[in-house]
Amino acid sequence: MSDAQNTDAAAERPAGLPQPALAAQALGQVLKPLARLMIDHGLHLPAMLELLKQALVEEATGAYGLNEKVSSDTRTALLTGVHRKDVRRLREAHNSSESGVPMLPIAATVVARWISEPKYLNADQTARPLARTPKRGQSGEPDFTTLVAEISTDVGARAVLDELVRLGVVGLQDDGYVALETTAFVPREGLQESFHFLATNVSDHLATAVHNLSPQRSTSPMLEQSAFSIDLSADQAEQLQSRARQLWTAALQQFLQTATVAEQRSQDDEGPRHRVRFGMYFHDALQTVPPVTDTRKTPP
């Protein structure tokens, strides 16, 4: 038996009043895997409360346009329930923070370009090995240094290469070429990279669902759908996961090729800039059997 979940249809309804009870019920389910993440990695409730306060303050001052308000601390406190002293403290702490150039997104983008740009592909659409530098390759042949330079000039090609080697994504050949070992870009070691993908993938997925259910939404709903199947044996569940991975590999390459063209066509556009994320997930868990309700009447 299978079915499909479609939040887009429900999201087509006109904007209305907030629904705190329904939101709380949904959040109760969303928080369960987050609670598991907390327990697994030693995050206790006080630390999570601080993170929640920080997120509430940032969303209220950013997404709800309170940055220019003179009484922003008071309005933020009213909107979120966070005390004004905490609002001021968290805002000052956020403004004083500095961040460097994130290595992982650049490395991931390099791999994405490598498996989607035609000049970096073989005739069978597999990623071709690249010379580390133009001098190591044939004249006119694409190379790894040029590939990195197309993505960013802030980080050197050697630093990106070292990171991809560390992750096990690429291998160095004796002839001075770099070969892509996997197109999945799933790190074989290092939790920092895995947590990065958890943060970016899950937050964007959840942001899409939240956008579709926003009482003030005036734009079209975003794509947010899934399908599920029940009453499966362990073997058949594994077969479905294998099939899902095959579908993702095909969809990923097609999307990245289209995205590359879209990026090139956007270069001369002076309008506001957008970022998009397209993803897929597969979840397998033991099925919960609903308890059998005894409908027999108890004699008086």
Image (cartoon, helix red, strand yellow):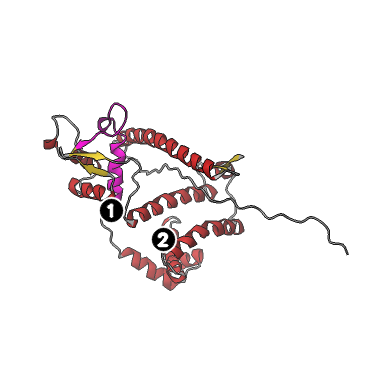
Residue 157 is situated, as x and y percent measured from the top left of the image, at 19, 45
Q: Nearer the viewer, residue 200 or 169?
A: 169
Residue 162 is situated, as x and y percent measured from the top left of the image, at 21, 49
Q: Residue furthest bottom?
A: 85
Residue at left offset 44%, top offset 58%: 59
Task: Name the image quarter holding the C terminus.
Answer: bottom right
The residue indicated by pointer 2 is 58
Residue 194 is situated, as x and y percent measured from the top left of the image, at 36, 53
224 in relation to 192, above or below: above
Q: Residue furthest left?
A: 135
Q: Give the numbered dot on residue 102.
A: 1
Q: Residues within 10 Å of mark 1 (few under 14, many from 20)?
A: few
Q: Give the numbered dot on residue 11.
A: none
Task: Point out the tag, 1 or 2, that comes first from the N-terminus.
Answer: 2
Residue 8 is covered by the magenta coloring: no
Q: Nearer the viewer, residue 250 or 152?
A: 250
Q: Quadrant of residue 108?
A: top left
Task: Name the image quarter holding the N terminus.
Answer: top right
What is the C-alpha distance between the residues marked 1 and 2?
Answer: 21 Å
Q: Nearer the viewer, residue 277 or 234?
A: 234
Q: Amino acid at mark 1?
A: Pro
Callout 1 secondary element: loop
**How many discs appear?**
2
Q: Quadrant of residue 129?
A: top left
Q: Is residue 117 visible?
A: yes
Q: Amino acid at mark 2?
A: Glu
Stretch in magenta: 102-130
Q: Is residue 222 visible?
A: no
Callout 2 secondary element: helix
